[in-house]
Image (cartoon, rainbow, N blue to C red):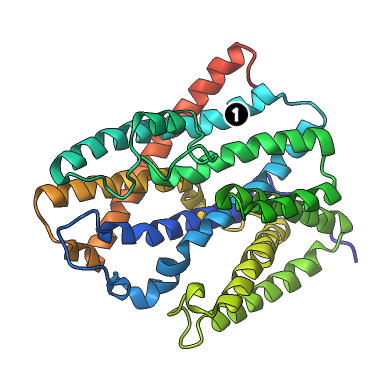
Amino acid sequence: MTHRTHTPQRFYSLDVLRGVASLSVVLWHWQVFFLPFNKLGAGFSIDKQPLFDVLSFFYKNGVVAVQLFFCLSGFIFFWLYSIRIADKTISLGSFSALRLSRLYPLHFITLIFVAVGQIVYTGITNTSFVYPFNDTYHFLLNLFFVSSWGLEKGLSFNGPIWSVSIEVLLYTMFFVFCRIFRRNLTALILITLVGYFVQRYNHAIGYGVMCFFLGGIAFIAYEKIVRGGDTWKVSIWLPLITSIAWLVTIGVASPNYGLTMSIGEAPWILQKIISNFVVVVLFPMTVISLALIETKKGTLGKRWAFIGDISYSSYLLHFPLQLTTALVTAKLAISQELFYSPWFMALFFMALIMISLASHRYFEVPMQHYLRLRLATRGGSS
C-alpha cells in the first residue's frame, strides 16, 4: 500500500533540536565563570557545577552541539535553497541579503556590547573576561564576519560568534556548490571528505564543511525516502534504530552510569571512534528521523518551536549575559562559589530565555523585515 506524503512547510522538530543544541552550548559554557581570568574564587571543580549528576553530559560534551548546528544548517539550506540556486531563480546578492538580514543585526549589537563590557571589566580586574584578543584588528574581523576564517590569533569579543562566522563562509561555499554541481551526490560526498581532511589544518573550517554537507547528504536521503513512497515504514524503523544507537553510544562512553562520564574520558582510540560515529552517523540519522516523523505525522514539536525561534538569540546573547554577570560579581567582590548554585543557574537561564524572546520578537524580526524591505526596493532581495 502506498502512503502519499508531502514535505512540511516547516520542520518544527528540527527547530526544537536546534534550540536544544543552543542551550547545550550554553550549559557547556557555564565553566567560563570559573576560568582563571577571574581571581575571586577557588579553583574550578567540574563536578561541583549545578545539578551535575543530571547535566554532566552537557557540561562535558555540549560543545559537540555546534557540529549538530552545522548538520542542521546543511539539511535546511539544501531543502530551502538548493534548487533555487541551481535553477538561478535566486541570485548571490539576494541570497546574501536574506542571510545577513537575519544574522547581522544581533551580531552587531552584541559585538558593540561586549567591546564596551570588556573595557569596563578590564578596568576592574586588569584582565579580559575569557576571550583576550579584543583589539582593533579582531574587532574589524568580527565586524565583517570573518573572525574565524584563519586570520585571527584566537577567539575574541563575543567568542561564540566563531561558529556563525564559519556558517557565513559555508553559505558562500554552498551557493557556489549548488550553482556548479546542483545536488550531485558524488560531489556532496567528495566535499564532505575534503572537510574531514581539512580538519588537520583548520579544525573549525574543516568540520564546519564536513558537517554542513553531511546535512546536505541527509536531505538528499530524506528526499529520496519521501519520493520512494515508503516514508511511513522508514519513519518507524529509522528513529528506532537511531534511538538504540544513541543509547548504546552513551552507554559505551559512560560505562559507570548513564551520562556521568564524557566521551573525552574514554581511551583515545575509543574516543575517536565514538566522536566520529556521533558526528558522521548519529547526527544525520537523527535529523532524517525527525524530518520523517514530522512528514508522516505533521507539525511535530510545534508547541515548542519557540525554542528554535530563539536559538540564535540565546546563542549570541549568553556570553554578553555572562560578561555582565562577571562584571557585577567582580565589582561587588562576590566569590565564584555563587556559580555553583542551582538557583543562580535557574535565574540565569530564565533571564537568558526572556531576553532572547524579547530580542527575537522586538528587535531581530523587525530588523530583518526592515532590511529585507529596503534591499528589495533596491532590487537586492527576492
Query: Is 245 situated above or below 109?
Result: below
* Residue 12 appearing in the image: no
Instruction: Locate residue 84, reporting x and y percent.
Output: 77, 32
The residue shown at (46%, 88%) is: 256
Q: Is mark 1 on a helix, strand or loop?
A: helix
The residue shown at (60%, 11%) is: 378
Query: Is 131 situated above or below 146?
Result: below
The C terminus: image quadrant: top right
The residue shown at (60%, 78%) is: 270
Instruction: Locate residue 214, reporting x and y percent.
Output: 70, 54
Q: Which amino acid does label 1 sit on?
A: Leu
Along the viewing direction, whichever of 251 and 172 lies nearer the viewer:
172
For residue 336, side relative to residue 94 (left or right): left
Residue farthest along the left direction in this orientation: 332
* Residue 368 appearing in the image: yes
Residue farthest along the right direction in this orientation: 1
Residue 111 in which image quadrant? top left
Along the viewing direction, whichever of 22 and 209 lies nearer the viewer:
209
Residue labelled with disc 1: 98
Neighbours of disc 1 within 10 Å: few (<14), some (14-19), many (20+): some
The mark total stands at 1
Residue farthest along the bottom direction in this orientation: 256
Instruction: Locate residue 216, reporting x and y percent.
Output: 73, 49
Residue 58 in which image quadrant? bottom left
Query: Is 347 situated above or below 121?
Result: below
For residue 205, side relative to residue 308 (left or right): right
Along the viewing direction, whichever of 188 and 155 lies nearer the viewer:
155
Instruction: Locate residue 294, reporting x and y percent.
Output: 67, 58
The N terminus: image quadrant: bottom right
Residue 126 in which image quadrant? top left
The residue shown at (52%, 79%) is: 266
For residue 84, side relative to residue 24 (left or right): right
